[in-house]
Image (tube, rainbow, N blue to C red):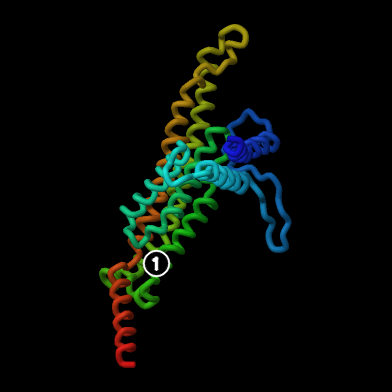
Amino acid sequence: MALDILYLCLCFCGLIFAIVLKVLFTPQSSDIDISGALVFFTIKLPFSDLPVSETQINSLVVIWSIFWLCRYLTHGISVHAKLKRQIVAEWIVEKTQNLVKSNMGDYFKSFAPFIAAIMGLSAFSSLLTLIGLYPPTSDINTTGGWAILVFFLITYYKFKCGPIHYLKSFGDPVPFLAPLNVISEFATPVSMAFRHYGNVLSGSVISVLVAVALRGLSGLIFGKLPGFLGDFPFLQIGIPAILSVYFDIFSGLLQAFIFAMLTMLYVAGGFPAEDYAARKAKRAARKSAAKHNS
């Protein structure tokens, strides 16, 4: 019990740290603020300075929180699940494994931890807006880094049949489409990064604009009421919360799922499974023939 409380406290202490930093470094202003991630400090380097912003700090906070949440869910597990947290952990693992198997096949079953990590990082990063923190997924550098990693994975599995086979694939289905296929190859990470980034950022911007508009409309309608009632933003009660359910929760979780699905489809779709199996069969046949001749 004490260990459970310790893990949960460690899970939430990162979020508390990020909130304290946000309060200490955010300048007071009554205007609309959609300027992006707040820069806490800058590290001087020989070639280029490195700004440390909310994006880096909040990304580390998300990783920290997910790590200790996983520790809480998995410590003290047994063969026969008796604890509710173990049942939750097994449900997450089972659903992720089934998702990977159904979309990528048995060859990629080891991808389940990677896909779970992508969905977890993306979802928790987007949900930071619920506690007033800047979501790292609203920064193109975050989603761009994830997309570049996925691009390297796609290219790696396309190279499974060798570089010649990889270069020939640009000529499918007809050779004169090779330039378009090359453009499409590099457009994949760009589209993945901007899709995720754009949806999360647009939701944050729309929520801020609607909240400010409701405050102005409330002052216009109820501004003539006596005392503090004239300054109270009545229209900001409830309506922004309803919008938050979509923009912060539904849209954030949906984008995490979409990014994970695109990762699975692009990696599995780029892998030439039949050609790879035929190549392995030829190699096995050559080895068998060499052993027989010797």
In the rendered view, does 227 fall on the left or right side of 119?
right
Give the residue number, with chain letter if any, for mark 1.
157
**Which is more toward the observer, 9 or 15?**
9
Farthest-out residue, bottom: 294
Q: Is residue 111 left or right of residue 221?
A: left
Q: Residue 215's x, y, as percent?
A: 54, 22
Depth order, front residue of 99/158: 99
Give SS at disc 1: helix
Residue 59 locus on image (x, y percent): 58, 47
Q: Is residue 54 above or below residue 153?
A: above
State the residue at coordinates (50%, 20%). 237
The location of residue 168, given as percent across then percent down, is 33, 75
The residue shown at (56%, 8%) is: 225
Could one spot residue 255 in this view of the protein? no
Q: Nearer the viewer, residue 106 or 256?
A: 106
Which quadrant of the rendered structure holds the C terminus? bottom left
Give how far across and how far down residue 206 sits, in percent.
48, 34
Residue type of the residue flagged with mark 1? Tyr
Residue 38 picture quarter: top right
Residue drawn at x 35%, y 62% as measured from the top left: 107
Outermost residue on the left side: it is 173
